[in-house]
Image: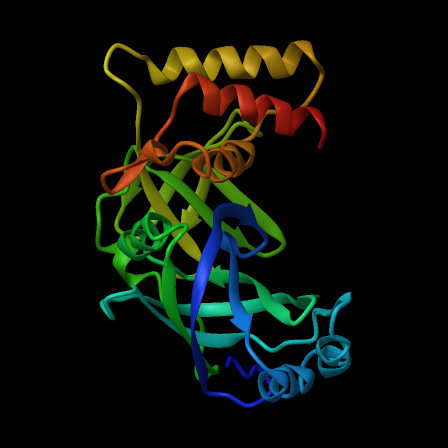
C-alpha cells in the first residue's frame, strides 16, 4: 500500500489520466493513479496522510470518502511499466489524495503533477495510459532535472515550453544557437529569446500534421477564430487540447512526437473561449 507519509514508498497503480499542461514550471504532466484498498490495515496506512480514511473504510455497507488537497512536498519519482521496464525518473507533486469507499471496498486515488520529463520519457508515460504502472516516491534530493538533453538536440521546428520567472514561454523554436533559442509564440509578434541553460524547466516536443495538411494554414485558421471571438490564441491551449483529446484518440501521440489535427485546434479554440 502506498504510504505518502513515510518515504520511500512504492505501489502498483492504474493510470487513468496523463495530460500535458503548460504552466509556471514549463511543460508538466497531470497524472491520475488509483489502487484498491483491501482491508482496514491498508486504510490505517492511508489515514496517516488522509485524515479520516480509516473511519470511512470502517463504516461498512455505506458510501464514504476522505480526501486531502495539497500539503505534500515535491518528491522524486521512479516509474516502471507493468513488466518492470523503466519509463521515467522525474519530480512530482501530489496535488490530491482521496479514498472512496463503497460497502466493504475502497479505492485510493492520487492526482500527481509530474515535472521534468524529457521527451522520450514523456511519450513512454503517455503510451502507458489505462494500464498499471509501478511508481516509487522518494524524498527529493538536489535540484530539478537539468535541460542538458534539450540543449544537445536541434530544437528548430519543435514546440518548446519553458519557465522564465513567473512567465510561461510556449511556442515554436525558429532559430537556435547552442543553448539560446528564438521562439515564435502566439502572444507576441517578436521572437522570445530563451537560454535553455538558465531557465528552471524546459521541454521540447516534435510536432507534425497528417499527410496533405498544412500546419501554417491550420494555425492561421485557429488564430483567426480566436481574433474574431476576441479571445487570446496560445500554444498553451494547444498543449492542453492534446492532453484532453489524447484520452479519446491515442494516435495524437505519434511516434516520438505529437500529431496536430483540426480537432486539436478546434478544442484549443474551445479552451481559449473559456479562459
In the image, residue 169 lies at what x, y percent? 51, 43
Residue for point 51% across, 79% down: 2
- x and y percentages locating residue 266 in the rendered image: 53, 19
Colour style of the rendered protein structure: rainbow
Please tell me which residue is depicted at 56% across the width and 33% down the height of the picture. 237
Q: Which quarter of the figure is the C terminus placed in?
A: top right
Examine the image and state in which quarter residue 166 appears. bottom right
- The reply, left or right, for residue 67 in relation to residue 83 is right
Residue 145 can be seen, yes or no: no
Q: Is residue 239 left or right of residue 62?
A: left
Q: Nearer the viewer, residue 134 or 123?
A: 134
Q: Residue at x 71, y 16 (%)?
A: 230
Left/right placement of residue 191 relative to residue 210 reads right
Residue in the foreground of this view, choosing between 79 and 154: 79
Q: Is residue 47 above or below residue 119?
A: below
Along the viewing direction, whichever of 262 and 2 lies nearer the viewer: 2
Amino acid at each position: 500500500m502506498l504510504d505518502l507519509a513515510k518515504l520511500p514508498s512504492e505501489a502498483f497503480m492504474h493510470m487513468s489520466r496523463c495530460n500535458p499542461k503548460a504552466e509556471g514550471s514549463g511543460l508538466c504532466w497531470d497524472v491520475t493513479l488509483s489502487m484498491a484498498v483491501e482491508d482496514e490495515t491498508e486504510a490505517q496506512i492511508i489515514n496517516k496522510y488522509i485524515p479520516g480514511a480509516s473511519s470511512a473504510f470502517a463504516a461498512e455497507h455505506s458510501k464514504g470518502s476522505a480526501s486531502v488537497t495539497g500539503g505534500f512536498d515535491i518528491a522524486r519519482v521512479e516509474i516502471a511499466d507493468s513488466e518492470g521496464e523503466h519509463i521515467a525518473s522525474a519530480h512530482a507533486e501530489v496535488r490530491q489524495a482521496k479514498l472512496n469507499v463503497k460497502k466493504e471496498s475502497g479505492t485510493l486515488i492520487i492526482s500527481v503533477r509530474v515535472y521534468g520529463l524529457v521527451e522520450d520519457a514523456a511519450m513512454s508515460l503517455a503510451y502507458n495510459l489505462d494500464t498499471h504502472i509501478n511508481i516509487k516516491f522518494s524524498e527529493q534530493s538536489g535540484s530539478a532535472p537539468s535541460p542538458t538533453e534539450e540543449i544537445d538536440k536541434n530544437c528548430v521546428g519543435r514546440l518548446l515550453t519553458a519557465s522564465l520567472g513567473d512567465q510561461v514561454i510556449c511556442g515554436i523554436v525558429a532559430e537556435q544557437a547552442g543553448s539560446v533559442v528564438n521562439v515564435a509564440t502566439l502572444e507576441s509578434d517578436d521572437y522570445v529569446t530563451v537560454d535553455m541553460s538558465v531557465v528552471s524547466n524546459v521541454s521540447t516536443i516534435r510536432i507534425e500534421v497528417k499527410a496533405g495538411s498544412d500546419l501554417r494554414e491550420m494555425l492561421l485558421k485557429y488564430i483567426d477564430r480566436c481574433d474574431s471571438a476576441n479571445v487570446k490564441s496560445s500554444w498553451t491551449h494547444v498543449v492542453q487540447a492534446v492532453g484532453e483529446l489524447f484520452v479519446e484518440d491515442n494516435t495524437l501521440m505519434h511516434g516520438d512526437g505529437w500529431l496536430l489535427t483540426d480537432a486539436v485546434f478546434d478544442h484549443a479554440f474551445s479552451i481559449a473561449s473559456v479562459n
